[in-house]
Image: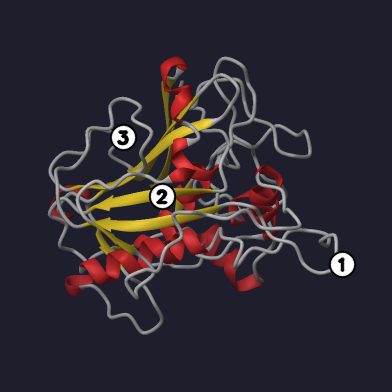
Amino acid sequence: MTWRGAVWRGTITLALVVAAVAGPRPARAYVRAVADTTQLPVFWPSPCAVVTVYMDGFTQLTSDEVAKSIAAAAQAWSPDVVTCPGTGADGGPSHPSFEIITQLASGGPTPDITGSDGKNSIIFRTTTWGHDATAIALTTRNTDPSGRIIDADIEVNALPSYQNGYVWANLDPGAPSAPGGMIQMDLQTALTHEFGHFLGLGHTCFNTAIDAPPRPVDDQGQPVPDCIQGADIPEARAVMWYQVEPDSSNKRVLTDDDARGVCAIYPPTSTPAACEANLPDDGCGCRAAGGRPAAGGALLLALGCLAGARRRRST
């Protein structure tokens, strides 16, 4: 089955400006994504997953900037960064038992992701988008009926600025403004959100215009609120709220509830699982790949599920 989840571009409203002045508040809860037919929570059955990045002629950022932004977004969810609630068996801090490994493709065609192939891609769509025009990025997960994730692909809306009204940027501190006052979207922020979908989290709200019922419930058993632009509610503080703001990088860092979500899906273990794909990188946080490499042992564990998979999309 296939699930698709995206993040939309928001606009800065008075409600959000007032909230920022008053100081951030934590989100209230997290939402597990579920398989369509069985409503079972989705998860990766292995300790890590490799994701290959295809720039497809994307030039708004350099390959180094893209590699940095994507690797940092993956790192936001990693055991190295996330501390789980409570303590480990030894009384010390504990961390989720899953890692995302990112790598740049150095050649080969952009893959066709219309079917499930047991491989994971990030693809910059530079010529055609084919999805909701207001979505800036989108994740498609393929799962089996038990909820095990077989593969997941992320697409980035990288059409020229005259078509979508913004440019992608690396909004690190001190980053220059876009020429001509063009709206900038922070790639790291958007990919941090999409990696949450990749891991098995859903939005902290329900979009009545496009989401199929039933309305999700959070980990407290409460129905999530409607997705409302500029909403001044705790759920909107989460990385997994449905939209990010232009010219902002304030959702690069997980809230406590985003962290609780990844820890719930991938409970800490006393001995971290070895990730065979976690090889030395190229110095910028992204491994270099020749063409379309094999996904490694982490993904081979899921290949046996391909025959029974159906595809569902989510934004």
Q: Residue at x 56, y 19 (%)?
A: 145
Classify residue 226 by image quadrant.
Answer: top right
Identify the mark at residue 132; answer none if there is no mark: 3
Q: Seen in the image, is 93 located left or right of residue 301?
A: right
55 relative to 150, above or below? below
Q: Residue 7 falls in which quadrant of the image?
A: top left
Cα distance, mark 1 to mark 2? 31 Å
The residue depicted at 48 percent of the width and 54 percent of the height is 276
Compare marks 3 and 2 and give the one earlier in the sequence: 2
Rendered position, 222 above or below 110: above
Secondary structure of residue under mark 3 = loop
**Mark 3 closeness class: few <14, some 14–19, many ≥20 residues within 10 Å:** some
Which numbered disc, 3 or 1, marks the residue closer to the eye? Answer: 1
Badge 3 or badge 1: first in the primary sequence: 1
Question: SS at mark 1?
Answer: loop
Instruction: Report whether 124 appears left or right of 314.
Output: left
Query: Considering depth in this image, is 50 or 18 the residue closer to the camera?
Result: 50
Q: Nearer the viewer, residue 78 or 228?
A: 78
Compare residues 271 and 76 and report the one nearer the observer. Answer: 271
Residue 50 image label: 2
Q: Vertically, is 10 above or below 155?
A: below
Indicate the amino acid at tag 1. Gly
Residue 274 placed where, x, y %? 57, 55
User: 233 or 38: nearer the eye?
Assistant: 38
- Look at label 2 and name its amino acid: Val
Residues packed near mark 2 inside 10 Å, few (<14), some (14 to 19) or many (20 plus):
many
> Where's residue 311, x and y in %?
40, 22
Question: How far is the residue under mark 3 from the one under mark 1?
Answer: 47 Å
| Residue projecting furthest to the bottom | 174
Q: Residue at x 22, y 49 (%)?
A: 164
Q: Quadrant of the C terminus?
A: top left
Which residue lies under the disc numbered 1? 91
